[in-house]
Image: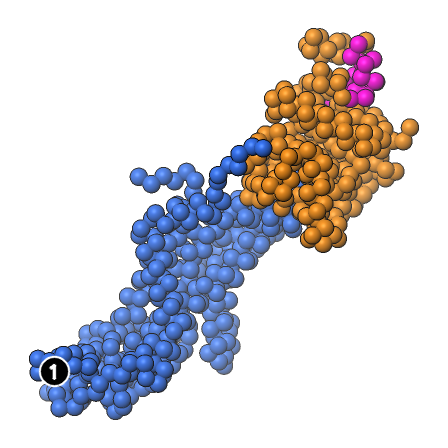
Amino acid sequence: MNKVLSIENLTVAVGSKRLVDQVSFDIPQGKIVALAGGSGSGKTTIGLSILRLIPSALRIKQGNIIFEGKNLLDLSAEDMRQLRGARIGMVFQEPLSTFDPLFTIGQQMDEVLVAHTRLSKQERYKKILETLSEVELSDPSRAYKSFPHQLSGGMRQRAMVAQAIVGGPSLIIADEPTSSLDVTLQVKIMELFVRLKNKNMSILLIAHDLGMIAQVADEVIILSQGEMVEKGPVSQVINQPRHEYTKQLVGAFQ
Amino acid sequence: MTKRINSSSRTQLAFTSFRRNRVGFFCLWVLMILYGLAIFADFICPYSYQDEDRSFSYCPPTAVEILDQGHWVHPFVYARALTFDSLHRRIYVIDHAQKYPIHFLKNGRLFTVDAPGRFYLWGADARGRDLFSRIWYGARISLSIGLLGVAISFILGLLIGGIAGYYGGWIDSVLMRFCEMFMMVPGFYLMLALRAAVPENFNSVQVYLSVVVILALIGWASLARIIRGMALSLRERDYVLAAKTLGVSDIAIIFKHILPQTISFSCATLMLTVSSYILAEAGLSVVGLGVQDPIPSWGNLLSDAMAIVPVIFAPWILLPGLFIFIAVMCFNIVGDALRDAFDPMFKES
């Protein structure tokens, strides 16, 4: 199977303390791979390591992050910037704080296209409206003109997804994308991710909700305190957990 | 379809709040009038700034007469003649036989009298130049020098503060040490030192520009430090990280997501800084290092009032000081009002 991303022996440390320890996994094309684990297990750090945006106190000690055949850890800062948003998109937990309150949704999506493409103003506008309707925002031209606080939480999260995919990435890193939403909206957003997956996009889903993971992910990796304790197809990991920590985690959701 | 939420942009909210501040709004009007008079000085003033008549040295303000033997007439002024009293003091004797009508809108001037009559609305200076005219021509220099200086120091301050705060690390250290080099010298002495570095044979435009640059060089450092502090905190915002994950370049992030957040502070500081620049220009000119006579500025007009004798016999030469006071007060009050208007925590009592 075609791998989009493969992480090999990734170790991230602050000082001598290892936050992520020897983690390896692959993300096949067109699949949703979930990273699960409790707070402080290193899920988000792995997500940000892929984009090389971990806080400056943290260091990637060893390992490789191979994306589309290139080791991201070897790229120059400028090559890395061009990759972000264009090849890899990221969705965050709280869209209200990840949109700049001073600019409209459209202006902020436009920034991505300005950074990565040479499209004309008209073409960019058209592309943004297409993307906004792709994430099923009922009135794309209105959403374009809205400031973040003018949209509801669910709409805002859709706009966030739209912003992540507008540059046409092949991999989306979604960091707890539904944690700030109520249950019905969570389902809607997850359906959106499944639809993106069906369009051959690969998704790294960072979440702690095993119930949700069981519904949408293809594979799951269980992390505990920076170490990978278990990985495999979702049904296998959840139905026959082998590791003690996985059993606890699965138990907590039943 | 959800209902459209009715909301105003931050600027609109700030403007509404600003308008409710009566004093601030009034001062903004005063400033606009001052700038208007300065811009239209050619039209408003009866004389050019260097039109002199030495026989009217320190001529007191001319009274405008509208009654002639109990009848309303077209406004006119009486002629005056200079004589000296027994103590050799200048005395202007009004000659009731000779009248000069005031012409309105003649020769492209708002009001004027025919020569050899002279019309000194606010008195004359030592060389018989009209103080009213010189004040409004001087306003062009004094009021524009502050704005230009502020514009330059703001561009410098925002750029350097933004870059230092956003990148941090050694870039921050280098830029901030550079700032401190400017901050450690007391402002006025730095100004004198920089002025000394300007060649003496500069013409008036070059002097004007060099004063602008000197003012800008003094002011940018403290602003850069404050903006740097704000940028240090703003760069930790989630939307800055989000913009990075989308591959937005650092410069775009600084200009779109860091600096606009400092607008409320910048706007207020901008106004407050203009007033300090007007004062600084006046200070330079009073000690004779600013714009040179015959070109007037409020500062060098006031330098005529440095000696006590002219002030006693011709107190109107202090008028430029009043205008410096008005302009500085208004900029300060407008600056405060703007800061309050942009501050979401500020509640009117």
Say what secondary structure mark 1 lies in.
strand
Location of the C terminus of chain A (image quadrant): top right
The answer for which chain carries disc 1 is B
The front one of B132 and B55 is B132
Q: Quadrant of residue B70?
A: bottom left
Instruction: Check the image and report above or below for B231 versus A214.
Output: below
Determine the residue positioned at 24% across, 77% down.
Answer: B121
Q: Residue furthest front?
A: B1
Colour scheme used in the picture? by chain
Q: Which residue lies furthest to the right in this view?
A: A1
Mark yes or no: residue B33 visible.
Answer: yes
Instruction: Check the image and report above or below for B291 versus B18.
Output: below
Q: Is residue B8 found left or right of B254 in the rendered image?
A: left
Q: Does the magenta stretch include residue B227?
A: no
Determine the residue positioned at 62% across, 46% down.
Answer: A107
The front one of B305 and B38 is B38
Which chain appears blue? B
The front one of B180 and A74 is A74
Q: Position of residue A114 (x, y in %)?
A: 70, 50
Instruction: Check the image and report above or below for B106 versus B16.
Output: below
Q: Position of residue A250 (x, y in %)?
A: 73, 11
Q: Is residue A218 magenta?
A: yes
Q: What's under tag 1, amino acid-wise?
A: Asp
Which chain appears orange? A
Q: Where is residue A32 in the image (x, y as percent from the top left)?
A: 79, 26
Determine the residue positioned at 65% across, 51% down.
Answer: B251
Location of the N terminus of chain A (image quadrant): top right
Instruction: Check the image and report above or below for A194 versus B332.
Output: above
Circle 1 sits on which residue? B68
Residue range (magenta): A217-239
